[in-house]
Amino acid sequence: MKPTLEEYLHTIVITLVLLGVGISLQRVKRAKPVFHVIDILVIWIFLPAVVFGSIAWQPPTKILGYAVPLAFIGLGVCFLLSMALAKTMRFDRKVGAAVILNSSFMNVTYLGFPVVYALIGFQYMGAASLYAMAIGIMHLTFGMVLAASATGKKVSVRKTVLGVLTFPAAFVLIVALLFAFLGHPPYDIQPAFDYMAKPAFFLMLLLVGYQMPLVNPRKYTGALVTTGIVRFVVCPLVTYIAILALGLSLGEMTPKPALIMAAMPPAVFNVIIASKYKLDLKLYGALVFYLTIISLFVALPLLMYVFGF
């Protein structure tokens, strides 16, 4: 069902309020331990629950869709193009890595999941979960390698692979896929996972706001424009071309969540990576914060208008 303008604005207002609350609590010392607990709850309970609930009871015919190929096509094109643009713009190694990382890896979980759920409904979360996990696994591997290379550090392949396999949502996705293909869990417990969706997305949005640093964008205009073009023009366009090439229609379960995910801003996890490898947090914060605003107010409304959903 197509959301009305009022419903979309309601979604945007709620999203911005939650992001704003998270941002406003950044300087509150007592909020730090609270958000540490929220982070643990989201990573270990709510995010795995959403992934499991959206996949485990799906018929195999819906699982064997095109979410993963669409994710890889969009990611691949954005990765290669942003590398070429970083070289053309003559960004130094660290700025170039920031442009590539933020152009390629978008906020498919903490922001993408809530937006898909709010705009088109829980029935599309299965395809959204597969798309998000495909991006997430590549993010955990190539994201770390790219950030480390920007600082001249080496990354252990063993630790990287182990980190992916032990990430709760990735592990739960494997379990959920086994249930979907080998036999569904009892249907009596399914409503419990559905009920967890709203508080999960509520906490995710608060966490996104809390983790977004506020900085002056003027210093980073080149990086912001370059990353914004790749994220909000190239990625949705490439995804739509791939949808047509695969013979899909927007009435199917995969294309809509794929297009919404393709228009997401850079992932907050990029800021965490930057912190881990002592990169320019202000640059990463500017890319995440300002492109999140553009995504919600410009990219998503245009995408919904152009593609008619």
Image (tube, helix red, strand yellow):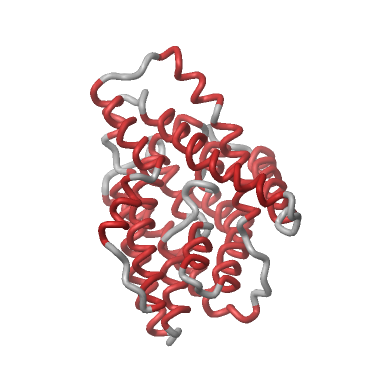
Front residue (pair 41, 57): 41
Front residue (pair 180, 47): 47
Q: Residue at x 55, y 28 (%)?
A: 196
Q: Left of 110 or right of it: where is 144?
A: left
Q: Residue at x 47, y 65 (%)?
A: 102
Residue 142 against residue 4 in the figure, above or below: below
Q: Left of 29 or right of it: where is 169?
A: left
Residue most toward the bottom? 90
Front residue (pair 162, 185): 162
Residue 141 against residue 130 in the figure, above or below: below
Q: Where, by quadrant of the figure, is residue 203 drawn?
A: top right
Q: Where, by quadrant of the figure, is residue 90 drawn?
A: bottom left
Front residue (pair 177, 33): 33
Q: Residue 150: horizontal and vertical position, in percent?
A: 40, 76
Q: Residue at x 39, y 72 (%)?
A: 82
Residue 222 against residue 56 in the figure, above or below: below
Q: Residue at x 41, y 70 (%)?
A: 147
Report the number of discs. Answer: 0
Q: Left of 259 or right of it: where is 21?
A: right
Residue 85 against residue 32 in the figure, above or below: below
Q: Residue 122: horizontal and vertical position, in percent?
A: 49, 31
Q: Residue 98: horizontal and vertical position, in percent?
A: 46, 72
